Image: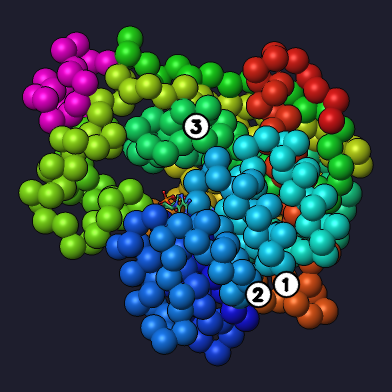
């Protein structure tokens, strides 16, 4: 399968790297980015004779259809425009989530793809992790009986929240997407995928309470490098990018792997990632709850909080319940347990999860998605045309509307 990559940032490069590790199945034939250093990295992963390099999306599109599938890894606000043009050129897509910045635009992408007979695979990588594959297998086996309730939590982790949603790319909802879409459309997708039903009612509440100026330590200056009196005690001190938080730099800093301490220090002094987390211009919530009623009677809840680490899932059925999570992923493999309601016995279900440092690995989901991609687009198991994962997008956008309007919404 021939692959072109639009947007060779953190996500584009991750997918390119994985695809290049499967050379008998994938060939990277084109790459485009505004930053030549980034396309050069993708070019280095491909056969240099066969890859065409472009300095923008417009140049890539002007060259016509150069692959079977286009991976779109540009930022949220660009997805819709880039995806619509790519569909019109005849590409199938691996489109990073969220597919677009509004529900209406997601629906328009779905309708366009259907009418053109094209498939859009969203970047919902969690479905492809060993952990959620194991959860889905238990659900599909019928061992749980009729499923009544689902409970999911997503602990973003305080430093991750600060890096991505306070200082970083997704800190301002007007320029990217609301938190429940940007971060938790993964989780809303999982709720829809596991419930296998259609939304009926959605309610949500959520707030930004911690990352506000009134919570700044006394005397904290706008940047960590400006002599903050609380630096040694602060969870969010940007100087941690020099030490234990260094792996996070590769998502936001070119050639981070090769950067010496002087360059990182300069980055802390000048980039958004050196700002005091209490003095940023973020409007993203740091905790949110979603409650859902599905047409098949399942009720589900999702808790998003900056102040925990990792995801958990509980599924309660008439014959058994399943619970597990990856909250301990930094300390080992996530665990999954099945409780049989008749015998009362508890069985541990094995999950083998590969290394998932930073968000690059996603518990094996990044690899899992690329490993599944050719089968999702071609052959007997291929997806139907349209935007796969539209339901999860719908839930996330409706949840945000419910939060803003402080009302239950009939979906
Ligand atoms: N699936 C997941 O779990 C997951 C995780 C993180 C991010 N994301 C999503 O992936 C997307 C990319 O995130 P990222 O962290 O890789 O961002 P990034 O900023 O590192 O990469 C985006 C790239 O697009 C390039 N670009 C922008 N406009 C362009 C244009 N007109 N033509 C060509 N290139 C252009 C930028 O130069 C940049 O290199 C976002 O939508 C984000 O929400 C998904």
What SS does tag 2 mark? loop
Could you tell me which residue is drawn at 35 percent across and 52 percent down? 251
What SS does tag 3 mark? loop
Contact flag, marks 2 and 3 (Cβ < 8 Å): no
The image quadrant of residue 408 is top right
Q: CA distance from mark 3 to mark 1?
A: 31 Å
For the C terminus, give its image quadrant.
top right
Residue occupied by mark 2: 68
Q: Is mark 3 within 8 Å of ligand 1?
A: no
Residue occupied by mark 3: 175
Residue occupied by mark 1: 377
What SS does tag 1 mark? helix
Q: Is mark 2 within 8 Å of ligand 1?
A: no
Contact flag, marks 3 and 1 (Cβ < 8 Å): no
Could you tell me which residue is drawn at 63 percent across and 71 percent down? 65
Q: Is residue 43 left or right of residue 398?
A: left
The image quadrant of residue 395 is top right
Q: CA distance from mark 2 to mark 3?
A: 30 Å
Q: Is residue 125 above or below residue 381?
A: above
Give how far across and how far down residue 73 sits, in percent.
51, 56
Q: CA distance from mark 2 to mark 1?
A: 9 Å
* Disc 3 versus disc 1: nearer the observer: 3
Q: Is mark 1 within 8 Å of ligand 1?
A: no
């Amino acid at each position: 399968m021939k692959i072109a990559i639009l947007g060779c940032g953190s996500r584009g490069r991750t997918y390119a790297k994985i695809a290049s590790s499967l050379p008998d199945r994938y060939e990277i034939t084109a790459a485009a980015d505004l930053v030549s250093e980034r396309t050069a990295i993708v070019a280095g992963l491909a056969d240099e004779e066969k890859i065409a390099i472009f300095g923008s999306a417009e140049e890539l599109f002007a060259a016509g259809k150069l692959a079977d599938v286009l991976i779109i890894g540009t930022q949220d606000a660009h997805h819709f425009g880039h995806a619509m043009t790519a569909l019109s050129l005849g590409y199938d897509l691996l489109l990073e989530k969220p597919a677009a910045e509004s529900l209406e635009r997601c629906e328009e992408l779905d309708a366009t793809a259907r009418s053109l007979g094209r498939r859009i695979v969203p970047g919902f990588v969690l479905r492809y992790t060993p952990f959620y594959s194991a959860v889905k297998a238990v659900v599909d086996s019928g061992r749980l009986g009729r499923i009544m309730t689902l409970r999911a939590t997503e602990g973003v982790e305080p430093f991750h929240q600060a890096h991505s949603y306070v200082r970083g790319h997704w800190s301002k909802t007007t320029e990217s997407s609301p938190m429940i879409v940007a971060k938790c459309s993964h989780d809303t997708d999982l709720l829809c995928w596991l419930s296998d039903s259609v939304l009926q009612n959605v309610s949500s509440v959520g707030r930004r309470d911690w990352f506000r100026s009134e919570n700044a330590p006394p005397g904290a200056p706008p940047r960590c490098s400006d002599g903050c009196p609380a630096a040694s005690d602060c969870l969010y001190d940007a100087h941690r990018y020099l030490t234990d938080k260094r792996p996070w730099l590769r998502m936001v800093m070119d050639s981070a792997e090769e950067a010496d301490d002087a360059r990182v220090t300069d980055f802390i002094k000048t980039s958004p990632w050196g700002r005091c987390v209490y003095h940023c211009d973020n409007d993203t919530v740091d905790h949110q709850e979603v409650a859902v009623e599905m047409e098949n009677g399942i009720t589900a809840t999702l808790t998003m909080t900056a102040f925990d680490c990792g995801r958990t899932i509980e599924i309660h059925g008439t014959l058994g319940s399943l619970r597990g999570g990856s909250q301990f992923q930094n300390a080992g493999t996530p665990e999954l347990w099945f409780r049989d309601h008749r015998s009362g016995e508890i069985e541990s279900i094995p999950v083998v999860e590969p290394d998932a440092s930073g968000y690059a690995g996603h518990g094996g989901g990044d690899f899992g998605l690329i490993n599944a991609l050719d089968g999702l687009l071609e052959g007997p198991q291929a997806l139907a045309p349209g935007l796969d994962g539209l339901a999860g997008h719908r839930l996330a956008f409706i949840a945000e509307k419910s939060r803003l309007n402080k009302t239950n919404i009939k979906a």
